[in-house]
Amino acid sequence: MNKRFLIITILAAGLTNTSWADKQEKLASPNGKIVANINIGKELTYSASFNGEQILKDCPLSLQVGQELLGVNPKLSNTKRTKIDEQIRPVVPLKQTVVPNKANALTLNFKGYCVEFRAYDNGVAYRFIINKKGVVDIVSEGINYHLPKAFEAHISKTRNFNTSYEQPYTHISTAQYKADDEITYLPVLLESPKGTKVLISESDVRDYPHTFLKSTGANGFTAVHPKSPETWEPRGDRGWTITKERNCIARTSGQRSLPWRFAVIGNDATIAANQMELVLGGKCELQDVSWIKPGQVNWDWWNHWTVWDVDFESGINNATYKYIIDTASKFGVEYVLLDEGWNKRVEDPFTYSDNIDVKELVEYGAQKHVGVILWLAWLTVEQHPALIKHYADMGVKGLKIDFMDHSDQWMVNFYERTARECAKHKLLVDFHGSFKPAGLEQRLPNLISYEGVRGLEQGGGCSPENSIWLPYMRNAVGAMDFTPGSMQNAQPEDNHGTGSLPIGGGTRAYQMALYVCFESGLQMLADSPTRYLREQECTQFIASVPTTWDETRVLAAKAGDYYVVAKRKGAKWFVGAITGSKPQDITISLDFLTRPAMLTSFRDGRNAHRIAVDYKKETQEVNPATTLTLHLARNGGWCGSIE
C-alpha cells in the first residue's frame, strides 16, 4: 500500500463524529473547573465537563423557525468572546444582597441568528438569539441532555402539560427511565456515578412556553413543549379548555433572545447555594420598588378558619379575620391572607360573602400595621381586570392568584400581563397552581413568590422524605411558597389530621427550621392563631425569621438526607437544619461568626422520633471557634438564632 495513502487512511479512521469541516470551540469557567466544548459540524452540539469528569456529551441544540431549521448544517460567520463580571442587587434578596454574575461567554454568529454560551464556576448556560423580520413561528426547539452513562435522576412525573407542579419526586436511574414513560417538568436533578450533581432548568422565559423533558431511552432527555393556544373557553370558575392550537410553540417577535437553558454543576452545596435562575433572569424593569415589602403572612385556609377560646363563632367572617389580624400584629407578622371563601362566588370578585367586608378588614389591618392579601382564581382576574385597581385603591397590599396549571405561551404571557398591571397599582403577587420561577420575578419583583411545590397544604401527602429534596430542586430555582408552620406535629405514619385540626408532617423543630431553610418573599404561617398563641416561644422564633437575607452559607448538604444553612440579616445569624426519614448527627462550625454571641436554639426532644411535638429550647454562649453537633430525629430539625 502507498505510504501516503496509508497515513491518510489512519488519520481518517481516527476522526470520530467529526468531519474535516467541523469547527470546535472551547469555553472554560473563570476558575477552569468547568469546560464546555462546542462542535459546529452537521449539527451544533456541546459537551460539558467538571474537574475532568464528563457530565454532558454531544448534546445537540436546534431551533425551527417557520420552515428554517437553525443549528443543523450551520455555517459559522464568526465568534466573539467576552468576560462578564458584574454584581446584581436583587430587589428581593432571598440569599444575599449582592449576587455575583461572573462568567466567560462565547457567541457563535450565524446568518440570521446566534447562540450564546456562558461558563460559570458553577455551571453552563446557552440561548438562541434570532434576528428575523416581523413575527415568526417557533415550531420547535431542540433541547437535549445526553449523559455519558447512567445517572441517577430526580424528577417530577406528569402525564401531560396540564399540571399544578405538585407531584412528589421520583428517583430513578436514567437507564430505567424509558422513552414512553411520563414526562417531567423542570427543574431536574441528576447525579453522576461519581456523585457530581447537575441541576437543569431555564430562565428569562418570556412570550414562550416552559420546557418539559422526556426520556430519550438512552441515558438522556429531550425537550417537549406545549403548543401555543389560539383560542380557548372557560371551564367552570377556574379552568379553561384550549379549543384551537397553533402549529408552533410560540408566535413571537423575530428579533429577540430565547430562554436560557442552564445546568448547575457541582456538589450538593453548590446546587443549594446557586442563583443561576436569578443571574440569567433579566434586569428589574420597575423604576420605583420602594413599596415592595417582603414579609410573613398569617394564612387561613390550611387551618380552616379555626380558632377557639373566643366569644364569637369562628369561620369566614370579619370577627375571625380581625382575630387573625390581632394575632399577626402581636407577633409582628406583616400580612394576613384572605383565601378562597371571602367572595360569594369565585367568578365574582366584587360581591363578598355574607359576613365579610373587605374594606373594613383593610382599614382594621392598617390600624394594626397588618396588610391584607386577597386570594383569586386566575380566570376571575382575566375576566375582571378592573379588580386590580379596585382593590389597590381600597388599600389591599397583594393578590394570591391560583389554578393556572398551564405553562404554554398564552399562560406565560398571562403571568406577565398580570404582574405588570399589579405593579402599576403597587400590588404584590403570589402565584399558586403555578410553574417554577424562570426570571419574571427578577424583571417584575412585585411577583414575590410562586407555589409549584408539594407543600404543607397536601396534608399527609407532604412528607419530610420528599421535602428534603426541595433545597436542591424546586427552591434551588427561586422563591417557593411551601406554607410551613404547623404547631401540631406528627411523624408521617401518624399524620391523620382533619381539615379543622390539621397536622404537619415532621417534628416541631423541623417545622420551625423550615423558616430558615426555605426561601420565599412571602412566607406563610399556616396554622391557627389559637395554636400560635398557645405556643408562644415557638411562634416568637418563627415570626423573628426574616424573609430576605444579606448573606447565606450552606454548612452541610446531602441531597435526599439533610440540609444545614446559616443566614445573616444585619448582625443577626439564623441557622436551620432539616432531615428526611433518617436520623442524622451533623457537626457544624460557627467560624462565620466574628465575635462571641448568644445562641438560642430549638432541637428535637428525646422522644421526637415518635412524639413529633417533643422539642427542647436551649441557650448557650458561642464564638467563632465553636462547633455544634446537631442531633436530628427522623423527619427532624434544628434551628437557632445568634446575636
Image (cartoon, rainbow, N blue to C red):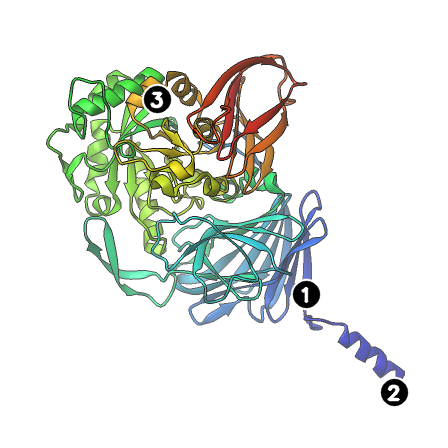
- In the image, which is nearer the foreground, mark 3 or mark 2? 3
- Within 10 angstroms of label 3, few (less than 14), some, or many (20 or more) residues? many
Q: Which residue is identified by label 2?
A: 1
| Whether label 3 touches label 1, CB < 8 Å | no
| Whether label 1 touches label 2, CB < 8 Å | no
Name the residue type under label 2.
Met
The answer to whether any part of residue 102 appears in the image is no
Task: Give how far across and how far down residue 200 sits, in percent.
Answer: 53, 51
How far separated are the C-alphas under marks 3 and 1? 59 Å
SS for tag 2?
loop
How far separated are the C-alphas under marks 3 and 2? 86 Å
Q: Nearer the viewer, residue 159 or 466?
A: 466
Name the residue type under label 1.
Lys
Q: Which residue is identified by label 1?
A: 23
Q: Which mark is residue 333?
A: 3
> Residue 564, located in which quarter of the rendered image?
top right
Q: Nearer the viewer, residue 580 or 27?
A: 580
SS for tag 1?
strand
The answer to whether any part of residue 568 appears in the image is yes
